């Protein structure tokens, strides 16, 4: 099935550092979403991107929808301990057969050392 | 405002049994999707329902079925459980077509022994 390649798989950083993660695909997506998941919880939507080239911020988080529509990145600035968790990218393919289907990346595990 | 609510939160079943998982969407949301998340992986799409009709289906066997009720709540049913069905089952809701800001519930942790 359709795959999203998310990297890196894990990151260990010091509090205050900036973080960058990205997702790539062989297919074009018409929507990119970034989620954060804490242990025992469902994913929480951080940022949604709807247009190629779109750059959107949510506090210390910034995400961009790649021009080719096949990639997206998420940056976290000045990380804090509560940023710990698993970050997922997700995309929605165009076309009626993909109705309602989000394709998720494998996740990036973020650990922040105080 | 209540978010997406799922029940039960945890469940242990034996191989071959049947299970029913329940989901209530955010008030005003008419679309519900189901996802399976195996430990260490991203969620995998199972079904989407909108206005009580199935609008999307993922690559899962016919042992998986679902339905949506007039109040937009939904059930996911899995028959003849296998050990590999052990996973976190997530429900997500949106207002409807064109709304891709899916809000997820906390999930049901199913363990098959």
Image (tube, helix red, strand yellow):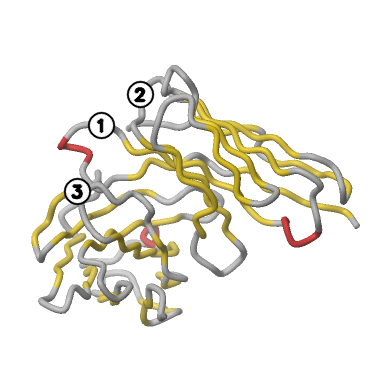
The quadrant holding residue A26 is: top left
Residue tagged by mark 1?
Answer: A94
User: In the displayed structure, does residue B3 sit left or right of residue B62?
Assistant: right
Foreground pick, B47 / B52:
B52
Place of residue B113 in the rendered image (x, y in percent of width and height, measured from the top left):
42, 71
Disc 3 to disc 2, how far (Cα)? 20 Å
Q: Residue at x 53, y 41 (%)?
A: A106
Q: Residue at x 26, y 61 (%)?
A: B95
The quadrant holding residue A95 is: top left
Foreground pick, A109 / B12:
A109
Place of residue B10 in the rendered image (x, y in percent of width and height, measured from the top left):
45, 79
Quarter the C terminus of chain A occupies: bottom right
For disc 2, the chain is A
CB of mark 1 within 8 Å of CB of mark 3? no
Foreground pick, B26 / B53:
B26
Q: Residue at x 44, y 64 (%)?
A: B88
Disc 2 to disc 1, how far (Cα)? 8 Å
User: In the displayed structure, does residue A45 sit left or right of residue A87?
Assistant: left
Q: Which mark is first along the chain, 1 or 2?
A: 2
């Amino acid at each position: 099935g359709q795959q999203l390649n998310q990297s890196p798989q894990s990151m260990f950083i010091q509090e205050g550092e900036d973080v960058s993660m990205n997702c790539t695909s062989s297919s074009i997506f018409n929507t990119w979403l970034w989620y954060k998941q804490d242990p025992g919880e469902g994913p929480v939507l951080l940022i949604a991107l709807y247009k190629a080239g779109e750059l959107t911020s949510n506090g210390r988080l910034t995400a961009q929808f790649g021009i080719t529509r096949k990639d997206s990145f998420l940056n976290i600035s000045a990380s804090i301990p509560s940023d710990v968790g698993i970050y997922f990218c997700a995309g929605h393919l165009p076309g009626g057969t993909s109705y309602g289907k989000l394709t998720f990346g494998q996740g990036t595990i973020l650990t922040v050392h105080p | 405002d209540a978010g997406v609510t799922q029940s039960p939160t945890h469940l242990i079943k034996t191989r071959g049994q049947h299970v029913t998982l329940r989901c209530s969407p955010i008030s005003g949301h008419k679309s519900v999707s189901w996802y399976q998340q195996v430990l260490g992986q991203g969620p995998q799409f199972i079904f989407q329902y909108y206005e009580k009709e199935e609008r999307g289906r993922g690559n899962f066997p016919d042992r998986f079925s679902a339905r949506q009720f007039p109040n937009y709540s939904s059930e996911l049913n899995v028959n003849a459980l296998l050990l590999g069905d052990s996973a976190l089952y997530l429900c997500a809701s949106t207002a409807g077509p064109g709304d891709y800001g899916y809000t997820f519930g906390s999930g049901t942790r199913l363990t098959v022994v």
